[in-house]
Amino acid sequence: MTTRVRPSNKRCAVIGGSGFLGRHLVEKLLDRGYSVSVFDIRQSYELPGVAFHLGDLCDKQALLPAMKDVSLVFHCASPAPASDDRGLFERVNIQGTRIVIQACIEAGVQKLVLTSSASVVFEGTDIKNGREDLPYAKKPIDYYTETKIEQEKLVLEACDKEKGLLTVAIRPHGIFGPRDPQLVPILVDAARRGKMKFIIGDGTNLVDFTFVENVVHGHILAAEHLRPDSPICGQPYHITNDEPVKFWDFMSDVLVGLGYAAPRYHLPYALVYGLALLLWLLALILRPLVSFKPTFTPMRVALAGTHHYYNCERAKQDLGYKPVVSLKDGIARTVQSYPHLRQGA
Ligand SMILES: NC(=O)C1=CN([C@@H]2O[C@H](COP(=O)(O)OP(=O)(O)OC[C@H]3O[C@@H](n4cnc5c(N)ncnc54)[C@H](O)[C@@H]3O)[C@@H](O)[C@H]2O)C=CC1
Ligand SMILES: CC(C)=CCC[C@@H](C)[C@H]1CC[C@H]2C3=C(CC[C@]12C)[C@@]1(C)CCC(=O)C[C@@H]1CC3
């Protein structure tokens, strides 16, 4: 007779645990007494109490050892949104997520928490105080968003009390904080190349930027509230700082904090969007001859010039969520953490 070891409810795996959000999540889980397996294609750090399993999440045989005796899995791996490799997004976010679900079922995992994105409902036009019942974007703005939609559907549909796998999706927006490889580095790079002098549109568009520790807090609350009788099974949850801010005020606060000038001159939104579209087309046509990546992509211009902020009332009610770090403190801690990106450094 084989006896199956019942996984401890303090053993978990973080797929994508070497990444920006994944590492912050791992650190908080350790603080809270969890033992953690990280599964990732790369190892970016070492920490006592963390077992690293290196592999591609599309490979079930590589995944299974990381899920051994684990009751809870966080899936926060994805190719970087800036990539334009459609095949990669489809392979990792869609096929790979199917494999993650199969592996969870085979390994007897009880809970799967997906890091989705609030962008799954964003089509490049204003969203003000959007709730979770907004329909998925019919015309997603890029391959990243297109495949994040399919990924979220797969995970939420896999929630099955009979089979013993419970699932939930967290939809963060504009994650920032120490060690972020995207937002602050892209911003500083643009400033150093003299491209941060302009405000796209009238500068009043409100956006959610979410400090990474609040996103981590939302994930852990979701995991700990995920039980067969709970209303959160198979549901998506917005997790934000609950302090929508003018996109250009946020950019200015970060830039000024790092010693750069704030953007000052206004450019009409339609003009910049049109130019970005033209550049994108040019890059596509010329790809066989020369490869260049424009800073101003239509997606970035849409993110910089429209309202996109989300209501997180559902997370407050069902998960008891409340941001643990304010926007002001989050910005101060982020700015402090990038001494090498300061003006003149
Ligand atoms: N950064 C942001 O503002 C937002 C991020 N998200 C989501 O949060 C999650 C985490 O994002 P970040 O930490 O910012 O990204 P990141 O790029 O820092 O981390 C992603 C990790 O996934 C790993 N990974 C990629 N492909 C893999 C594969 N085939 N097999 C195994 N591991 C693989 C990478 O090596 C990396 O360590 C992603 O799912 C992203 O879609 C959602 C909303 C906003
Ligand atoms: C809230 C949210 C979803 C933020 C996403 C983060 C990034 C997409 C932004 C981080 C830095 C931003 C940025 C621009 C667009 C959006 C970001 C990439 C510009 C390219 C917009 C046009 C400019 O004037 C330069 C900006 C540099 C920084």
Image (cartoon, rainbow, N blue to C red):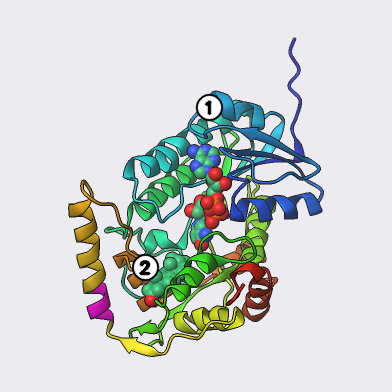
Q: Earlier in the sequence, mark 2 or mark 1?
A: 1
Label 2, label 1: how many angstroms apart (C-alpha)?
Answer: 35 Å
Quarter residue 24 falls in: bottom right
Percent x, y of residue 98: 45, 35
Residue range highlighted in magenta: 269-273
Residue designated by label 1: 60
**Residue 300, numbered circle:** 2
Residue that protrudes farthest toward the front in the picture: 344
- Image check: 211 left or right of 4? left
Dot label at residue 127: none
Report if the CB atoms under discs 2 and 1 are less than 8 Å apart.
no
Which residue occupies 58% across, 37% down? 165
Indicate if the residue with disc 2 has its beta carbon within 8 Å of ligand 2. yes
Q: Secondary structure at mark 1?
A: helix
Check disc 1: other Cα within 10 Å, few if <14, some if 14-19, many if 20+: some
Residue 336 appears left or right of 271: right
| Residue pictured at 70% horizontal, 35% vertical | 70
- Examine the rendered structure and indicate whether residue 280 appears above or below residue 90: below
Of tags 2 and 1, which is closer to the observer? Answer: 2
Question: Residue 85, percent across and down?
Answer: 34, 46
Quadrant of the image containing the N terminus: top right
Magenta stretch: includes residue 117: no
Q: Which quadrant of the picture is home to ligand 2?
A: bottom left
> Is 130 or 1 nearer to us in this picture?
130
Q: Of the residues shown, which amino acid type is indicated by label 2?
A: Arg
Q: Amino acid at mark 1?
A: Lys
Q: Residues within 10 Å of mark 2 (few under 14, many from 20)?
A: some
Taking depth in this image into account, of 23 and 46 the one nearest to the observer is 46
From the viewer's perspective, tell me whether residue 10 is left or right of residue 202. right
At 59% from the left edge and 40% from the top edge, which residue is drawn? 42
Mark 1, ligand 1, within 8 Å: the answer is: no
